[in-house]
Amino acid sequence: MTYFASWLTSPQYVKGCEGKIEMHVSPEDIIALIEASLEANYSDVRTASNKIAKSISNYDLESAKKIKSVLRKRGVPLQSSGYIESLPVDTKSRMPLLEEAQWPVSPLFLNSEAKNVFQTFLADIINIDKLISHGLSGRLNLLLSGPPGTGKTLVAGHIAAQLNRPLYIVRLDSVISSLLGDTAKNLRQIFDFAPKKNAILFIDEVDAVAKLRDDRHELGELKRVVNTLIQGLDSLDDHAVVIAATNHSGLLDPAIWRRFPYKINFDIPDFGMRESLWNHFLFLDNGEDHITKLLAKLSDNLSGADIESISIATRRKCVLTQTDINLVSVINAVIGSTLGNTATPTNDELSTAEKKNITCLLHRTHGITQVDLSKILNTSRQTISSYLKE
Ligand SMILES: Nc1ncnc2c1ncn2[C@@H]1O[C@H](COP(=O)(O)OP(=O)(O)OP(=O)(O)O)[C@@H](O)[C@H]1O
Ligand SMILES: [Mg+2]
């Protein structure tokens, strides 16, 4: 970074511009960054770096963007510096009760309803002080529910990234101890710890607490755990942000449910989202419209994670065999996949039986013309016609 040395003297100037422009990176910001780094204080490193990025953005947008991008990519716990030691742990197992998650680098595709809640939630967090001053404070708690692989964890990551705040994922497997008394103690530790770090708290599989009900535990004891969770949520101040996710929203205790005023119900992605997912994951945002539409049509039973998984497997094959994407092989894998259980594309020439099967399905069920089929299967129209006759 060419400007770094010059920041240390004041006033600073940007070279390469006509005349001299004063820069507003103060030595205090640099000192704050160094101190935060040496203390392995992850959120302060981020705050100081963001401040620096902001102050140079008027003069050197490229470097400001680079700083932001480094911050996004390096959103990993400072384990090597011993930072992880400071996370709360279960007294018996010494397992950390929280882990800091990396900010996502891949884009998020949402339908319009989900996008609306996502944007409203973000705007309310950003403007919370204004809302409080008008007596409109409320819990900044978001509940994400829906099938596996539909983007719940991704949403939590994007919210943290947009807010420039660390994301702590609660490890419910460590939190739920064989002794319910310890479970309650662990929950209390988490709710004491997260606000101090200005972190977004992400409680994944929040229904796990409710599932204890089916277990061997006494109902009274279980109630205490649920109450501790509720007390924890209630103890947070108006600026705290909690996101919870569940695959089984029906199992959630209604008292917990009520504490999450913002809700996004995920479902299998709709047609438009599937198109975007194929375009992004398989064709790196450069796909042909009629092909992404075809794949979107065929994958109406798959989740975003399934589409990503088939796409990545295909691209791996292409790299290793130095070939282009074999569309028929992808179609064959899509047809052979079910939700959460994807088939691996082979990239090999398909057997005649497989080709016949695909031809009939695409023509009869999806109305693909014989001309298009001959292009997709890279075979003559006569062959396609004979497949259909047979
Ligand atoms: N709506 C989406 N937009 C973009 N990518 C998605 C979407 N849904 C799923 N994916 C892809 O699938 C991956 C898995 O999604 P994610 O972990 O967020 O699912 P989840 O709903 O949290 O699943 P689980 O219930 O199993 O935890 C993501 O990292 C992303 O690559
Ligand atoms: Mg998840």
Image: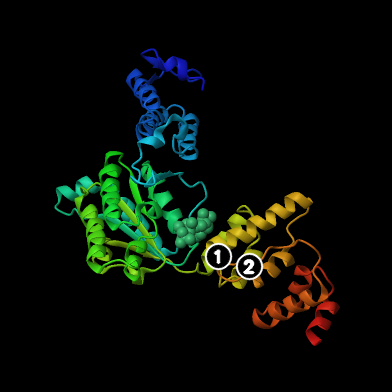
At horizontal 79% and vertical 63% (from top left) the residue drawn is 348
Please tell me whether residue 23 is drawn above or below residue 129 in the rendered image: above
Q: Which residue is mark 2?
A: 295
Please tell me whether residue 126 is drawn above or below residue 113 in the rendered image: above
Return the disc, 1 or 2, that comes first in the chain's sequence: 1
In what quadrant of the picture does the C terminus appear? bottom right
Classify mark 1 as within 8 Å of ligand 1 or not, answering yes or no: no
Where residue 197 sits in the image (x, y, percent)?
31, 39
Where residue 148 sits in the image (x, y, percent)?
48, 64
Depth check, front residue: 232 or 277:
232
Q: Which residue is mark 1?
A: 274
Please tell me whether residue 103 is drawn above or below residue 66 in the rendered image: below
Classify mark 2 as within 8 Å of ligand 1 or not, answering yes or no: no
- Look at label 2 and name its amino acid: Leu
Answer left or right for 13 relative to 367.
left
Alpha carbons under labels 1 and 2: distance apart: 8 Å
Q: How busy is the neighbourhood of tag 2: few (under 14 within 10 Å), some, or many (20 plus)?
A: many
